[in-house]
Image: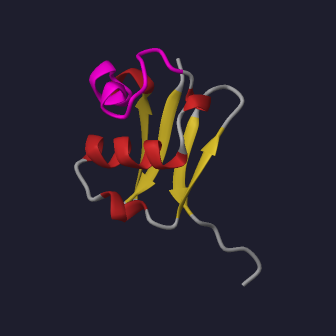
Amino acid sequence: MPSLHVRHAGQSREIPFEDIFTADNLAAIGLSEGVQSTALSSQNVKNLTANFIDCPVSDFDGYEVDFHKNQNITLRPEAEFGT
């Protein structure tokens, strides 16, 4: 079962898709239940995650959304390399 991995406020969380991408949540953004992760935009993921963990969506400004081939999604802060 695909999941969303999110790093937020110093915590890492692994959230099963069925917990966050519910029929009601998906319908609210115009998508149907059972949608593949590839149909979600980065902003969809940020909005649904903010709603799920009860934080402002602005907390995810500057975050990257990685869509993986196995349908998992990672929502993480931007990484800086070589500084």
Residue 51 image position (x, y, % from top left): 27, 44
In the shown orientation, is residue 78 left or right of residue 32?
A: right
Query: Residue furthest toward the right?
Result: 82
Residue visible at 63% across and 67% down in the picture: 79
Query: Residue 69's x, y, as percent?
Result: 72, 30
- What kind of colouring is applied to the model shown? secondary structure
Residue lying farthest to the left in this orientation: 54
Magenta stretch contains residue 34: yes
Up/down of 80 relative to 78, above or below: below
Farthest residue to the front: give it. 30
Q: State whether residue 62 is above or below residue 13.
A: below
Is residue 81 part of the magenta span, yes or no?
no
Which residues lie in the magenta part?
Answer: 20-35
- Image quadrant containing the C terminus: bottom right
Q: Out of 28 and 57, give the one closest to the viewer.
A: 28
Which percent across, then down, holds residue 27?
33, 25
Classify residue 72 as left or right of residue 20: right
Q: Residue at x 73, y 74 (%)?
A: 81
The reply, left or right, for residue 15 in relation to residue 37 is left
Judging depth in this view, the residue of 66 and 35 nearest the camera is 35
Kindly identify the residue that appears in the image at 36 percent across and 63 percent down.
59
Look at 77% across and 79% down and name the residue there: 82
Between residues 71 and 23, which one lies in front from this camera angle?
Answer: 23
Q: Quadrant of residue 8?
A: bottom left
Look at the picture and state if 37 lies above or below 64: above
Tally the marks. Answer: 0
Give the image quarter of residue 16.
Answer: top left
Seen in the picture, residue 64 relative to 81 is either above or below; the reply is above
